[in-house]
Amino acid sequence: MSGSHTSGTRRALLLGVYFTFIILPLYWMIKMSLQSNEDILGAFSLLPVNPSLDNYVIIFTDASWYTGYLNSLTYVFMNMAISLGVALPAAYAFSRYRFIGDKHMFFWLLSNRMAPPAVFLLPFFELYHAIGLFDTHIAVAIAHCLFNVPLAVWILEGFMSAVPREVDEMAYLDGYSFPRFFTTVFMPLIGNGIGVTAFFCFMYSWIELLMARTLTLVDAKPIAVTMTRTMSAAGLDWGLLAAAGTLTLVPGALVIWFVRNYIAKGFALGRV
């Protein structure tokens, strides 16, 4: 019994240390966001010194700040819609049909996901300038599809393959057209997969910076690029930067909250 108790105490201690290392940077960023530069650079303190919401007020009232969040959310949700719209029929084709080169094409899609974004920057930059898409939300959304569509196809194909083919056959016997079957019968069956896919598409597009920074200038500039404005002749505005970083975590946390059950089921099915 004593050995079991000691083992349990050791595990609890290790978990405590682990969660401390995870939570401490987040807490410190929130603490800094509630302070001025003078307080941040002053004496060390575990609690905020003279806490205030001035940094958040600046972000919510300065158009050059809050438009960065709106720009990021705009192209992220556009990318999610495009990626799912393309990946759903593509994954169904890979799941239900066999055609020449299907395995090679499936591997080629995944190889695009493995390529570093910098490889595609120059082609995208030149192409968007030529056709007038530079510095637009749709430009970033389409560019991110290069990586999100393969990931979405791979995840969805696993969920679709888990659905018996007899479901398709019974629906056709009952007189369902393919669009009606796919939207009213098949998609609800893979709802967990769609939720997991939407989560991963959102997270990649939300945190990706290289393409978003290169393909935008003013009108579609994301918040990650706007945050670099905190550098001035006087140095970094640490409090404002911490407030912007804290707010950047909110959309991702909300998405994780809403799809947490889908993610858990996705891990249980072994495809995620």
Image (cartoon, rainbow, N blue to C red):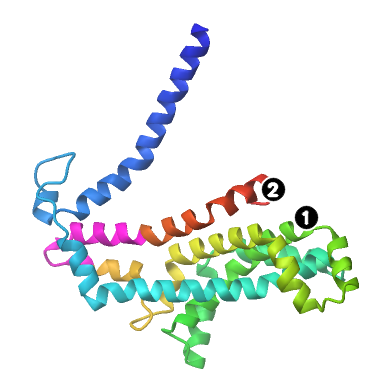
Q: Residue furthest front?
A: 174
Q: Quadrant of residue 186?
A: bottom right
> Residues under labels 2 and 1: Cα distance?
9 Å
Above or below, 69 against 204 in this view is below
Within 10 Å of disc 1 (Cα), the crowding (few <14, some 14-19, many 20+) is: few
* Left or right, 7 with reference to 183: left
Q: x%, y% of residue 59?
A: 23, 68
| Range shown magenta | 230-248
Mark 2 / mark 1, whichever is N-terminal: 1
Give the dominant element type of the magenta stretch: helix, strand or loop.
helix
Q: Is residue 213 visible?
A: no
The residue under the point 19% across, 57% down is: 239
Q: Does the magenta segment cover residue 244?
A: yes
Residue behind mark 1: 162
Residue 104, position as x, y percentages in the image = 79, 65
Going 49% across and 16% down the picture, which residue do you hit? 7
Q: Helix or strand or loop: what does disc 1 sit on?
A: loop
Which structural element holds mark 2?
Answer: helix
Residue 144's place in the image compared with 116, above or below, is below
User: x, y percentage for residue 151?
Assistant: 63, 62
The answer to whether one can see residue 9 in this image is yes
- In contact (CB < 8 Å): disc 2 and disc 1: yes
Residue at the image point whose x is 70% and y is 67% from the top: 187
User: What's the amino acid at mark 2?
Assistant: Leu
Residue at the (18%, 62%) spot, across then down: 55
Q: Is-magenta flag for residue 136?
A: no
Label drawn at residue 59: none
Q: Nearer the viewer, residue 53 or 243?
A: 53
Residue 112, image x, y percentages? 63, 66
Q: Amino acid at mark 1?
A: Ala
Residue matched to label 2: 269
